[in-house]
Amino acid sequence: MAPGDEVISIDGVVPRDIIEWRFLVDDADPILEVERGGLQITLEVTKRAGEPLGVDVQSALFDQVRTCDNHCEFCFIYQLPPGLRQSLYLKDDDYRLSFLYGNFTTLTRFTEADLERVVTERLSPLNVSIHATDPEVRSAMLRNRRGATSLRWLRALLDHGIEVHGQIVVCPGTNDGAVLDDTLAGVLDRFPELASLCVVPLGISRYNTEPTMRAHTRAEAAAVVDCVEDWQDIYQRVLGRRLAFVGDEYYLLAERPFPSAETYESFAMHEDGVGMACTFEREFFDETAPTTGPQAGFFAWADSSGSSEADYEPYRGTRATPGQLLQIRPHRHAPVGILTSTYGAAVLAPLITRLGRPDVRLVTVDNDFFGGTTGVTGLLVGEDIARTLASEPAGHRYLLPDVCLSNGRFLDGTGPEDLPHPVEIIPTHGHALRVALADPSRTVAATP
């Protein structure tokens, strides 16, 4: 095979995605029909079952991405600024991308055929957006009448032993208060087998056009925390586990301390901002603590970059690789500035204070690019980082977490080389930050 070959079929089967590809090329002696320069070629491969084929493919999905037909008021894709990479504007509701990348699906486009494939091929775990168990509330939130009935597929998935993680995005005045209480009761009644359930606040950018969508007040955030913690006690008594967890952002909004590590059990929803602050602190001060960083998908080797619906680019794309780490460093004893977001600064400030290092400071980057309530580090862009660094002194060491980057680029298309001062890209976990502060000569590979 040669780069650019188009695989037509494997053993007579046309693969729809990388999941099917992996199963087909895992067999012994596959026969591939390939198109090259307008000619169709048959390639007979001699190999053992389970032996790697040695061929990488361009994208994770070979057919069209199943796009989302919901019109949620709180959808962040509707709130993206113009001029970004076209792939970022694609709304998906594809269970395959849930399995591959941890995306959330509402199941409004799920079918009997999809259920059969998920169960047969054991495509687990999946992530499902619940938002509300009341059919009318959920339908209104999704602006899709199928939202009232699509949770029947969640029940079917659980009945067949598929591991499912749930999510509730809370919108003030819509599904908080009594509705949230009813939803958590509905989960216990209808979906107690859920592996976990995260409760997170909606995100608001300055491009939001929905007048009813607004940020939480401190009292509203505190009420959400109280509600979920009350239900954790109920779940613990009935199910023997807490099941539901509040996103870290809620504790920041409510100005409350984060729970202990034991509260989060296995940190199943860490990637969705649940327990990140707790794990970061543990990693930072305890070098023996396990790293709970971004989790690689089942097919972590798949190239996820692309520019069309067939070449899906997830938000959780490949981060910086060891070869992309910038090793341009000022003097090893130079003052250190840790680049972070407003929420990141709230988490890191007490850790840096405990560290007792006057030469280490936080450089907080305000997210003017997205604006609104956007305060997470993963949505920082080069434009805002460059503006902030421009007013910082030269010759200092500046540490940048790799969560800001996807394939070496910020969301606005710029890269670390466009910044006014050299930066050191480090993995986004406590171990890496501790090592970088203790000995700048040591290299820590960024998490792909």
Image (cartoon, grey):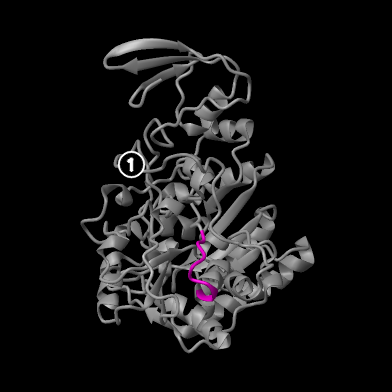
Q: Position of residue 51 (x, y in %)?
A: 60, 25
Tell me: residue 336, above or below residue 114: below
- Nearer to us in this view, 143 or 338: 338
Q: Position of residue 35 (x, y in %)?
A: 34, 16
Q: From where the camera sits, is residue 79 visible?
A: no
Residue 368, quarter of the rendered image: bottom left
Q: Is residue 441 magenta?
A: yes
Q: Main secondary structure of the magenta part?
A: loop
Indicate left or right for 22 with 414 as reference.
right
Q: From where the camera sits, is residue 49 visible?
A: yes
Q: Give the residue drawn at x 54%, y 85%.
A: 350
Q: Is residue 392 magenta?
A: no
Indicate left or right for 77 with 429 as reference.
left
Residue at the spot of label 1: 306
Tell me: residue 44, above or below residue 68: above
- Nearer to us in this view, 36 or 261: 36
| Range of magenta residues | 437-444
Q: Position of residue 333 (x, y in %)?
A: 45, 80
Q: Give the residue drawn at x 43%, y 37%.
A: 60
Tell me: residue 303, above or below residue 46: below
Q: Give the residue drawn at x 47%, y 60%.
A: 137
Q: Give the residue drawn at x 78%, y 63%.
A: 240
- Give the secondary structure at mark 1: loop
Tell me how many marks there are.
Answer: 1
Q: Position of residue 157 (x, y in %)?
A: 62, 42
Which residue in the rendered view is the most extreme toward the left? 83
